[in-house]
Amino acid sequence: MVSSLDQLKETGTVVVTDTGEFESISKFKPQDATTNPSLILTACKNPKYLKVVDKSIEKVFTRNIKIDIFNELEVILDQIIVEFGTEILKIVPGRVSTEVDARLSFNKEKTIEKALRLIELYENNGVSRDRILIKIASTWEGIQAARELEFKYGVHCNLTLLFSFIQAVACAEANITLISPFVGRILDWHKANGTLEDVDVDPGVESVTRIFNYYKKYGYTTIVMGASFRNIDEIKNLAGCDFLTISPNLLNVLNESDELIIKKLDSKKSVKVCNDDKVNVIDNESKFRFEFNQDQMSTEKLSEGIRKFSADTNELLEFLKQRVQEFKRVNKL
Ligand SMILES: *[C@@H]1O[C@H](CO)[C@@H](O)[C@H](O)[C@H]1NC(C)=O
Ligand SMILES: *[C@@H]1O[C@H](CO)[C@@H](O)[C@H](O)[C@H]1NC(C)=O
Ligand SMILES: *[C@@H]1O[C@H](CO)[C@@H](O)[C@H](O)[C@H]1NC(C)=O
Ligand SMILES: *[C@@H]1O[C@H](CO)[C@@H](O)[C@H](O)[C@H]1NC(C)=O
Ligand SMILES: *[C@@H]1O[C@H](CO)[C@@H](O)[C@H](O)[C@H]1NC(C)=O
Protein backbone atom coordinates (compact mmCIF):
# COMPACT_ATOMS: atom_id res chain seq x y z
CA MET A 1 0.00 0.00 0.00
CA VAL A 2 1.31 3.41 -0.95
CA SER A 3 1.44 5.77 2.02
CA SER A 4 -0.48 9.04 1.91
CA LEU A 5 2.88 10.80 2.03
CA ASP A 6 4.06 9.08 -1.13
CA GLN A 7 0.72 9.70 -2.80
CA LEU A 8 1.01 13.37 -1.93
CA LYS A 9 4.43 13.49 -3.58
CA GLU A 10 2.91 11.81 -6.64
CA THR A 11 0.45 14.69 -7.10
CA GLY A 12 3.49 16.80 -7.92
CA THR A 13 3.75 18.50 -4.55
CA VAL A 14 7.27 18.98 -3.20
CA VAL A 15 7.33 18.27 0.54
CA VAL A 16 9.44 20.43 2.85
CA THR A 17 9.75 20.10 6.60
CA ASP A 18 9.82 22.82 9.23
CA THR A 19 12.46 21.89 11.76
CA GLY A 20 15.81 22.95 13.07
CA GLU A 21 16.48 19.40 14.21
CA PHE A 22 19.00 17.66 12.00
CA GLU A 23 17.74 14.26 13.02
CA SER A 24 14.18 14.67 11.87
CA ILE A 25 15.51 16.25 8.69
CA SER A 26 17.61 13.18 7.93
CA LYS A 27 14.67 10.97 8.78
CA PHE A 28 12.16 12.56 6.42
CA LYS A 29 14.53 13.48 3.61
CA PRO A 30 12.67 16.59 2.52
CA GLN A 31 13.80 18.37 -0.61
CA ASP A 32 14.29 21.64 1.27
CA ALA A 33 14.34 22.73 4.88
CA THR A 34 13.80 25.90 6.79
CA THR A 35 14.96 27.64 9.93
CA ASN A 36 13.57 30.56 11.89
CA PRO A 37 14.50 32.25 15.17
CA SER A 38 12.18 29.97 17.17
CA LEU A 39 13.66 26.81 15.67
CA ILE A 40 17.22 28.09 16.07
CA LEU A 41 16.51 28.98 19.68
CA THR A 42 15.20 25.49 20.40
CA ALA A 43 18.18 23.92 18.66
CA CYS A 44 20.69 26.15 20.50
CA LYS A 45 19.26 25.08 23.84
CA ASN A 46 19.70 21.44 22.93
CA PRO A 47 23.04 20.27 24.39
CA LYS A 48 23.63 18.21 21.25
CA TYR A 49 23.95 21.33 19.13
CA LEU A 50 25.97 23.48 21.49
CA LYS A 51 29.03 22.66 19.43
CA VAL A 52 27.47 24.50 16.49
CA VAL A 53 26.97 27.53 18.71
CA ASP A 54 30.49 27.39 20.07
CA LYS A 55 32.02 26.88 16.65
CA SER A 56 30.24 30.03 15.47
CA ILE A 57 31.45 32.08 18.43
CA GLU A 58 34.97 30.86 17.86
CA LYS A 59 34.85 31.63 14.16
CA VAL A 60 33.78 35.19 14.80
CA PHE A 61 36.56 35.82 17.32
CA THR A 62 39.35 34.04 15.50
CA ARG A 63 38.57 35.55 12.14
CA ASN A 64 39.24 38.95 13.59
CA ILE A 65 36.17 40.45 12.06
CA LYS A 66 36.10 44.05 13.10
CA ILE A 67 33.15 44.25 15.40
CA ASP A 68 32.17 46.89 17.84
CA ILE A 69 30.85 45.83 21.17
CA PHE A 70 27.32 46.95 20.32
CA ASN A 71 26.77 44.56 17.49
CA GLU A 72 29.06 41.76 18.58
CA LEU A 73 26.12 39.54 19.49
CA GLU A 74 24.37 40.21 16.22
CA VAL A 75 27.46 39.27 14.24
CA ILE A 76 27.62 36.04 16.21
CA LEU A 77 23.92 35.41 15.74
CA ASP A 78 24.24 35.77 11.95
CA GLN A 79 27.12 33.30 12.03
CA ILE A 80 25.09 30.81 14.07
CA ILE A 81 22.12 31.02 11.76
CA VAL A 82 24.39 30.39 8.79
CA GLU A 83 26.21 27.56 10.60
CA PHE A 84 22.90 25.75 11.23
CA GLY A 85 21.87 26.36 7.64
CA THR A 86 25.17 25.00 6.36
CA GLU A 87 24.77 21.83 8.44
CA ILE A 88 21.24 21.35 7.14
CA LEU A 89 22.46 21.70 3.57
CA LYS A 90 24.72 18.68 4.14
CA ILE A 91 21.53 16.65 4.56
CA VAL A 92 18.93 18.09 2.19
CA PRO A 93 19.52 18.10 -1.56
CA GLY A 94 17.70 21.40 -2.16
CA ARG A 95 17.64 24.71 -0.38
CA VAL A 96 17.50 26.07 3.11
CA SER A 97 15.44 29.09 4.09
CA THR A 98 17.15 31.58 6.37
CA GLU A 99 15.25 34.37 8.02
CA VAL A 100 16.20 38.01 8.01
CA ASP A 101 15.93 39.58 11.48
CA ALA A 102 12.20 40.27 11.91
CA ARG A 103 12.98 43.52 13.67
CA LEU A 104 13.90 44.89 10.24
CA SER A 105 10.49 44.10 8.75
CA PHE A 106 9.64 47.73 8.04
CA ASN A 107 13.05 48.75 6.72
CA LYS A 108 13.76 47.95 3.10
CA GLU A 109 17.41 49.01 3.04
CA LYS A 110 18.36 47.22 6.26
CA THR A 111 16.59 44.08 5.09
CA ILE A 112 18.65 44.09 1.90
CA GLU A 113 21.83 44.71 3.86
CA LYS A 114 21.12 41.85 6.28
CA ALA A 115 20.21 39.47 3.48
CA LEU A 116 23.44 40.22 1.62
CA ARG A 117 25.38 39.72 4.85
CA LEU A 118 23.86 36.26 5.36
CA ILE A 119 24.62 35.36 1.75
CA GLU A 120 28.23 36.48 2.25
CA LEU A 121 28.58 34.28 5.34
CA TYR A 122 27.15 31.31 3.45
CA GLU A 123 29.57 31.93 0.62
CA ASN A 124 32.41 31.98 3.16
CA ASN A 125 31.26 28.49 4.07
CA GLY A 126 31.40 27.43 0.44
CA VAL A 127 27.62 27.48 -0.02
CA SER A 128 26.37 29.17 -3.17
CA ARG A 129 23.44 31.56 -3.12
CA ASP A 130 21.41 29.21 -5.28
CA ARG A 131 20.91 26.99 -2.28
CA ILE A 132 19.60 29.72 -0.03
CA LEU A 133 16.16 31.25 0.26
CA ILE A 134 16.14 34.45 2.25
CA LYS A 135 12.99 34.58 4.30
CA ILE A 136 11.35 37.97 4.66
CA ALA A 137 8.01 39.06 6.14
CA SER A 138 5.48 40.13 3.49
CA THR A 139 5.22 43.78 4.50
CA TRP A 140 5.34 46.45 1.80
CA GLU A 141 8.99 47.12 2.68
CA GLY A 142 9.81 43.41 2.80
CA ILE A 143 8.34 42.77 -0.64
CA GLN A 144 10.20 45.73 -2.12
CA ALA A 145 13.45 44.53 -0.53
CA ALA A 146 12.91 41.06 -1.95
CA ARG A 147 12.17 42.49 -5.39
CA GLU A 148 15.55 44.18 -5.39
CA LEU A 149 17.36 41.18 -3.94
CA GLU A 150 15.97 38.98 -6.68
CA PHE A 151 16.48 41.42 -9.51
CA LYS A 152 19.77 43.09 -8.65
CA TYR A 153 21.61 40.42 -6.68
CA GLY A 154 20.16 37.11 -7.84
CA VAL A 155 19.26 36.32 -4.24
CA HIS A 156 16.22 34.07 -3.99
CA CYS A 157 13.56 34.93 -1.44
CA ASN A 158 10.82 33.17 0.50
CA LEU A 159 8.13 35.66 1.52
CA THR A 160 6.56 34.64 4.76
CA LEU A 161 3.77 35.82 7.09
CA LEU A 162 1.61 35.95 4.01
CA PHE A 163 -2.11 35.85 4.78
CA SER A 164 -3.84 37.85 2.09
CA PHE A 165 -4.42 37.86 -1.63
CA ILE A 166 -2.96 41.34 -2.08
CA GLN A 167 0.35 40.31 -0.49
CA ALA A 168 0.49 37.36 -2.87
CA VAL A 169 -0.27 39.57 -5.88
CA ALA A 170 2.55 41.96 -4.99
CA CYS A 171 5.01 39.09 -4.53
CA ALA A 172 4.18 37.64 -7.93
CA GLU A 173 4.60 40.99 -9.64
CA ALA A 174 7.92 41.42 -7.83
CA ASN A 175 9.18 38.14 -9.34
CA ILE A 176 9.80 36.58 -5.96
CA THR A 177 11.04 32.98 -6.07
CA LEU A 178 8.64 31.58 -3.47
CA ILE A 179 5.84 32.59 -1.14
CA SER A 180 4.67 30.65 1.87
CA PRO A 181 1.04 31.52 2.58
CA PHE A 182 -0.08 30.31 6.00
CA VAL A 183 -3.01 27.97 6.20
CA GLY A 184 -3.47 26.98 9.84
CA ARG A 185 -2.92 30.44 11.24
CA ILE A 186 -5.77 31.74 9.09
CA LEU A 187 -8.05 29.04 10.46
CA ASP A 188 -6.86 29.84 14.02
CA TRP A 189 -7.86 33.46 13.60
CA HIS A 190 -11.32 32.68 12.30
CA LYS A 191 -11.91 30.21 15.11
CA ALA A 192 -10.79 32.72 17.73
CA ASN A 193 -12.78 35.47 16.10
CA GLY A 194 -15.93 33.40 15.87
CA THR A 195 -16.14 34.03 12.13
CA LEU A 196 -15.90 30.45 10.91
CA GLU A 197 -19.09 30.31 8.93
CA ASP A 198 -19.07 26.81 7.58
CA VAL A 199 -17.01 24.13 9.32
CA ASP A 200 -16.49 22.37 5.99
CA VAL A 201 -14.84 25.40 4.44
CA ASP A 202 -11.35 26.06 5.73
CA PRO A 203 -10.52 29.73 5.05
CA GLY A 204 -6.78 28.95 5.01
CA VAL A 205 -7.22 26.30 2.33
CA GLU A 206 -9.46 28.67 0.35
CA SER A 207 -6.88 31.43 0.53
CA VAL A 208 -4.05 29.26 -0.81
CA THR A 209 -6.28 27.76 -3.50
CA ARG A 210 -7.21 31.23 -4.72
CA ILE A 211 -3.58 32.36 -4.84
CA PHE A 212 -2.49 29.18 -6.63
CA ASN A 213 -5.13 29.53 -9.34
CA TYR A 214 -4.47 33.26 -9.77
CA TYR A 215 -0.76 32.64 -10.26
CA LYS A 216 -1.28 29.85 -12.76
CA LYS A 217 -3.98 31.69 -14.69
CA TYR A 218 -1.81 34.74 -15.24
CA GLY A 219 1.40 32.83 -15.78
CA TYR A 220 3.32 33.94 -12.70
CA THR A 221 6.23 31.66 -11.86
CA THR A 222 6.47 32.44 -8.14
CA ILE A 223 6.23 29.12 -6.29
CA VAL A 224 3.27 28.71 -3.94
CA MET A 225 4.18 26.85 -0.83
CA GLY A 226 1.42 26.26 1.72
CA ALA A 227 2.66 26.32 5.31
CA SER A 228 1.47 26.07 8.93
CA PHE A 229 -0.96 23.16 8.95
CA ARG A 230 -3.23 22.28 11.83
CA ASN A 231 -4.56 18.97 10.53
CA ILE A 232 -4.27 16.40 7.78
CA ASP A 233 -7.41 17.61 6.00
CA GLU A 234 -5.81 20.93 5.21
CA ILE A 235 -2.93 19.11 3.58
CA LYS A 236 -5.18 16.74 1.68
CA ASN A 237 -7.21 19.64 0.33
CA LEU A 238 -4.09 21.31 -1.02
CA ALA A 239 -2.60 18.23 -2.69
CA GLY A 240 -1.11 19.37 -5.97
CA CYS A 241 0.09 22.74 -4.61
CA ASP A 242 3.64 23.48 -5.82
CA PHE A 243 5.20 22.94 -2.38
CA LEU A 244 3.87 22.19 1.09
CA THR A 245 5.85 22.58 4.28
CA ILE A 246 4.79 20.04 6.86
CA SER A 247 5.80 19.54 10.48
CA PRO A 248 7.48 16.26 11.49
CA ASN A 249 4.34 15.24 13.45
CA LEU A 250 2.00 15.55 10.50
CA LEU A 251 4.60 13.97 8.20
CA ASN A 252 4.54 10.96 10.49
CA VAL A 253 0.77 10.75 10.34
CA LEU A 254 0.85 10.95 6.55
CA ASN A 255 3.55 8.30 6.36
CA GLU A 256 1.59 5.93 8.52
CA SER A 257 -1.70 6.45 6.73
CA ASP A 258 -2.73 4.87 3.46
CA GLU A 259 -5.75 7.07 2.94
CA LEU A 260 -6.30 8.09 -0.64
CA ILE A 261 -4.90 11.48 -1.67
CA ILE A 262 -6.52 13.20 -4.63
CA LYS A 263 -4.93 16.06 -6.54
CA LYS A 264 -6.97 19.13 -5.59
CA LEU A 265 -4.93 21.94 -7.11
CA ASP A 266 -4.30 21.60 -10.81
CA SER A 267 -2.71 24.31 -12.91
CA LYS A 268 -4.48 22.99 -16.00
CA LYS A 269 -7.81 23.98 -14.48
CA SER A 270 -6.78 27.37 -13.10
CA VAL A 271 -7.96 29.46 -16.04
CA LYS A 272 -11.43 28.05 -15.56
CA VAL A 273 -11.69 28.20 -11.79
CA CYS A 274 -10.01 31.55 -11.15
CA ASN A 275 -12.50 34.44 -11.15
CA ASP A 276 -10.04 37.15 -10.23
CA ASP A 277 -9.14 39.91 -12.65
CA LYS A 278 -5.48 40.76 -12.94
CA VAL A 279 -4.36 43.24 -10.28
CA ASN A 280 -1.40 45.64 -10.42
CA VAL A 281 -0.07 46.85 -7.12
CA ILE A 282 3.71 46.52 -7.01
CA ASP A 283 4.26 50.20 -7.87
CA ASN A 284 1.29 51.51 -5.92
CA GLU A 285 2.09 51.64 -2.23
CA SER A 286 -1.11 53.35 -1.09
CA LYS A 287 -3.21 50.81 -2.94
CA PHE A 288 -1.30 47.93 -1.38
CA ARG A 289 -1.58 49.37 2.11
CA PHE A 290 -5.25 50.14 1.74
CA GLU A 291 -6.18 46.73 0.35
CA PHE A 292 -4.12 44.99 2.98
CA ASN A 293 -5.65 47.04 5.74
CA GLN A 294 -9.13 46.06 4.59
CA ASP A 295 -8.40 42.54 5.78
CA GLN A 296 -8.53 42.43 9.56
CA MET A 297 -7.27 38.85 9.84
CA SER A 298 -4.19 39.49 7.70
CA THR A 299 -3.18 42.71 9.42
CA GLU A 300 -3.50 41.13 12.85
CA LYS A 301 -1.70 37.91 11.93
CA LEU A 302 1.14 39.73 10.18
CA SER A 303 1.85 42.01 13.11
CA GLU A 304 1.53 39.17 15.58
CA GLY A 305 4.00 37.08 13.55
CA ILE A 306 6.56 39.88 13.44
CA ARG A 307 6.22 40.43 17.20
CA LYS A 308 6.72 36.73 17.88
CA PHE A 309 9.85 36.37 15.72
CA SER A 310 11.26 39.59 17.15
CA ALA A 311 10.73 38.30 20.68
CA ASP A 312 12.45 35.02 19.77
CA THR A 313 15.37 36.92 18.27
CA ASN A 314 15.72 38.92 21.48
CA GLU A 315 15.61 35.75 23.53
CA LEU A 316 18.23 34.20 21.28
CA LEU A 317 20.51 37.22 21.76
CA GLU A 318 20.02 36.96 25.52
CA PHE A 319 20.96 33.28 25.45
CA LEU A 320 24.05 34.06 23.36
CA LYS A 321 25.17 36.79 25.70
CA GLN A 322 25.83 34.23 28.43
CA ARG A 323 27.48 31.79 26.08
CA VAL A 324 29.79 34.50 24.71
CA GLN A 325 30.75 35.68 28.20
CA GLU A 326 31.67 32.12 29.04
CA PHE A 327 33.74 31.82 25.86
CA LYS A 328 35.59 35.03 26.62
CA ARG A 329 36.28 33.96 30.19
CA VAL A 330 37.68 30.59 29.16
CA ASN A 331 39.78 32.09 26.37
CA LYS A 332 40.84 35.12 28.42
CA LEU A 333 39.53 37.57 25.80
C1 LIG B 1 7.32 5.45 6.98
O1 LIG B 1 6.72 4.26 7.34
C2 LIG B 1 7.46 3.13 6.96
C3 LIG B 1 6.61 1.87 7.20
O2 LIG B 1 5.63 2.09 8.16
C4 LIG B 1 8.75 3.10 7.74
O3 LIG B 1 9.52 1.96 7.37
C5 LIG B 1 9.51 4.35 7.39
O4 LIG B 1 10.68 4.43 8.15
C6 LIG B 1 8.67 5.57 7.65
N1 LIG B 1 9.35 6.72 7.11
C7 LIG B 1 9.47 7.80 7.79
C8 LIG B 1 10.14 8.90 7.05
O5 LIG B 1 9.07 7.91 8.95
C1 LIG C 1 9.61 29.29 3.44
O1 LIG C 1 9.22 29.84 4.67
C2 LIG C 1 8.15 29.14 5.30
C3 LIG C 1 7.62 29.96 6.44
O2 LIG C 1 8.52 30.15 7.46
C4 LIG C 1 8.62 27.78 5.68
O3 LIG C 1 7.59 27.08 6.32
C5 LIG C 1 9.04 27.06 4.41
O4 LIG C 1 9.55 25.79 4.71
C6 LIG C 1 10.05 27.87 3.61
N1 LIG C 1 10.21 27.26 2.32
C7 LIG C 1 11.32 26.68 1.88
C8 LIG C 1 11.29 26.09 0.52
O5 LIG C 1 12.31 26.64 2.55
C1 LIG D 1 9.45 40.56 -13.48
O1 LIG D 1 9.87 39.78 -14.59
C2 LIG D 1 9.23 40.14 -15.79
C3 LIG D 1 9.60 39.12 -16.83
O2 LIG D 1 10.97 38.82 -16.78
C4 LIG D 1 9.62 41.55 -16.16
O3 LIG D 1 8.97 41.95 -17.33
C5 LIG D 1 9.21 42.50 -15.02
O4 LIG D 1 9.67 43.79 -15.28
C6 LIG D 1 9.78 42.02 -13.70
N1 LIG D 1 9.18 42.81 -12.64
C7 LIG D 1 9.88 43.40 -11.67
C8 LIG D 1 9.08 44.13 -10.65
O5 LIG D 1 11.09 43.34 -11.60
C1 LIG E 1 -14.08 39.49 14.30
O1 LIG E 1 -14.08 39.96 12.98
C2 LIG E 1 -15.05 40.95 12.69
C3 LIG E 1 -14.97 41.30 11.22
O2 LIG E 1 -14.50 40.24 10.47
C4 LIG E 1 -14.83 42.16 13.56
O3 LIG E 1 -15.86 43.08 13.35
C5 LIG E 1 -14.77 41.76 15.02
O4 LIG E 1 -14.39 42.85 15.79
C6 LIG E 1 -13.82 40.62 15.26
N1 LIG E 1 -13.89 40.17 16.62
C7 LIG E 1 -12.82 39.85 17.35
C8 LIG E 1 -13.11 39.31 18.69
O5 LIG E 1 -11.69 39.97 16.93
C1 LIG F 1 -2.99 53.49 -7.20
O1 LIG F 1 -4.20 52.83 -6.93
C2 LIG F 1 -5.28 53.72 -6.73
C3 LIG F 1 -6.45 52.91 -6.23
O2 LIG F 1 -6.69 51.80 -7.03
C4 LIG F 1 -5.56 54.48 -8.01
O3 LIG F 1 -6.63 55.35 -7.84
C5 LIG F 1 -4.31 55.23 -8.41
O4 LIG F 1 -4.51 55.84 -9.68
C6 LIG F 1 -3.12 54.29 -8.48
N1 LIG F 1 -1.92 55.08 -8.66
C7 LIG F 1 -1.07 54.81 -9.63
C8 LIG F 1 0.14 55.69 -9.67
O5 LIG F 1 -1.22 53.91 -10.42
Image: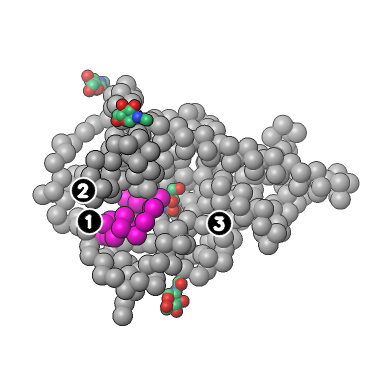
Q: Quadrant of the N terminus?
A: bottom left
Marks 2 and 3 sit apart, C-alpha to C-alpha, by 31 Å
- Mark 1 Cα within 10 Å, few/some/many (few <14, many 20+)? many
Marks 1 and 2 sit apart, C-alpha to C-alpha, by 8 Å
Q: Is residue 189 magenta?
A: no
Residue 35 position within the rendered picture, expressed as x and y whole percent measured from the top left? 52, 52
Name the image quarter holding residue 176: top left
Q: Are marks 2 and 3 in contact (CB under 8 Å)?
A: no
Residue with the mark numbered 2: 213
* Dot placed on the residue nearer the N-terminal end, 1 or 2: 2
Q: Are marks 1 and 2 in contact (CB under 8 Å)?
A: yes
Residue 319 position within the rendered picture, expressed as x and y whole percent measured from the top left? 70, 44
- Does residue 34 show up? yes
Residue with the mark numbered 3: 20
Q: Is residue 18 left or right of residue 175?
A: right
- Identify residue type, mark 1: Leu
Residue drawn where x is 47% and y is 28% of the image = 106
Q: Secondary structure at mark 3?
A: loop
Q: Is residue 53 left or right of residue 225?
A: right
Marks 1 and 3 sit apart, C-alpha to C-alpha, by 29 Å
Residue 204 position within the rendered picture, expressed as x and y whole percent measured from the top left? 31, 46
Residue with the mark numbered 1: 265
The magenta span reads 221-243
The residue lying furthest to the right in this view is 332
Q: Quadrant of the C terminus?
A: top right
Residue drawn where x is 75% and y is 33% of the image = 69
The residue lying furthest to the bottom in this view is 1
* Dot placed on the residue nearer the N-terminal end, 2 or 3: 3
Image disc number at residue 118: none
- Identify residue type, mark 2: Asn
